[in-house]
Every structure is written in structure tokens, then in C-alpha cells.
Amino acid sequence: MYRILLVDDDHDIVGALKIYLQNSDYELLCAYDGKQAVATVEQGIEDSRPIDLVLLDVMMPVMDGPAALVQIRKLSNVPVIMLTAKSEDADKVLGLDLGADDYVTKPFVPAELLARVRSALRRYKRLGAANPQEEEAASTLVLGGIELNDAAKKVTVDGEAVALTPKEYDICHFLMKHPGRVYSPAAIYEAVWGAPSYGCENTVAVHVRHLREKIEINPAEPRYLMVVWGRGYKMGGAR
């Protein structure tokens, strides 16, 4: 059973989230500010019962969502879905910048919320499900100085390990499987997020920028992850 942490200072919203998710065989935990959320994630790690997904509000007392996200990312790569107001695009970009995997806007559409939660959990499970001893040789992709071992879920660049978030890893894996092929932001979103790509450009752009910062020596002059203006992104060999 997946353990999902619901974080919002509005008890009514937490109650609504519990109603939306309670019939989906999840163990639901609640926190009402960012400090409580960080403590709950940390306690789960200490108890060997880690949180599998966090739904995290942006505006909260004591410690807000972005500050909590920074602390959570120091502890875990657990998927984090930010809860934002419909009109606050800046909150969405900030959350993605800080390492959030996705966002859901208020007021929630229950079907969309469930779809995003299930999609995030599927990716998270897939990242930890492979057996490296059985699949390592068959699942290794190499492109120039980048080596991606999908069995071990590891990426190295010029022999140095690179720490990627689950979304960054999925984007890297998707593009490395099709070297030289250009994919639009919509195509990347649908392949990686497993959801319709409405208004996805900023989400994909932020994750691609973070990925480039981690795999490129000089992100301004990339060797691997290229922008094809007006079309999308591709993974090419070192120039």
C-alpha cells in the first residue's frame, strides 16, 4: 500500500483530498504546515516506512510549501505534487524549479488529481522495480560521455555519477532511447508524465533546464541535450 502525505493548512482541503483518495487503497497521512511535512517524511525514512508521494500546498504558516520542498529534497527523491491556485503561474514555475514533479491547481478536479497521483506513483515504482543483476547489460544506454543504466537507475557523465530527480531521469532515458530525434514539449510530456499535454510547455522546459544543468559541463553550450528552436528537444552525441 502506498503512503501518501497530504499537506495543507486548510483542514477542509485536506478533508477533500482524503475523500478523493480514500477509495484508492492508499495509506493517507496529514500535515498542516511545511515543518510537519518535513518531519513526517524524515520519520518515515527513520522507520523504514518511507512516504511514497507528497501533495504539498504552496501557501502555509510556519514553513511554506517551497521551503518545505527544499528540505524534503535533501532527504528524498519522493514524488512531490504541488497544490497551487489556478492563476498563480509563478508558484508552478517556482515549485518545478525547486524539484517538484508536477502540480495540480485548485479547485481540484478529482479525476485529474487521481490521474496525476497514479501516474507519479507508477513512475516512482518503475524507477525502483528493476533487478540490476538481471537487466544491467541489456538496459545500459551510452551516448558520448553519458551512460544510463536503467536497471540500476544510475546516470554517469564522463564517469561521474549524476543525481537526477525521477522526472529528470525519465526525460533523459526517453531522449537517449531515440538519439538525434526531435521531440516537442507535448510529446515529451505525454511520454514521461503519461497524461494529456495541455499547457505543458513550462513544465517540460523547467525539467529540461535542470537536466541540462546536471549533465552538461557548460549548459550554455550543450554537448548533448539540444534545443531545436520552434520544434523541441533532442539528445545528440558530443560535438
Image: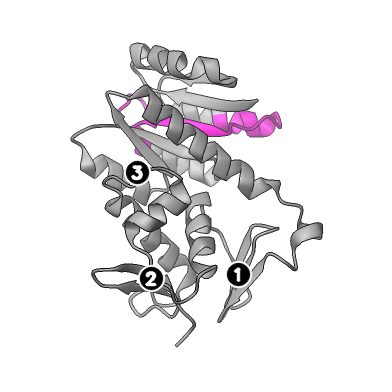
Q: Residues within 10 Å of mark 3 (few under 14, many from 20)?
A: many
Label 2 vs label 1: CA separation? 23 Å
Q: Residues within 10 Å of mark 1 (few under 14, many from 20)?
A: some
Q: Quadrant of residue 47?
A: top right
Q: Is residue 51 magenta?
A: yes
Nearest the viewer among 20 and 59 is 20
Q: In the rendered view, does 24 fall on the left or right side of 195?
A: right
Residue in view at x 71 percent, y 51 percent:
130
Of circles 2 and 1, the one toward us is 2
Q: Residues within 10 Å of mark 2 (few under 14, many from 20)?
A: some
Residue that mark 1 sits on: 156
- Say the numbered circle drawn on residue 182: 2
Residue in view at x 36 percent, y 38 percent:
103
Please state the extent of the stretch shown in magenta in the rendering.
Answer: 41-66
Q: Amino acid at mark 2?
A: Val
Q: In the rendered view, does 2 fall on the left or right side of 206?
A: right
Whether residue 216 is situated above or below residue 51 in the rendered picture: below
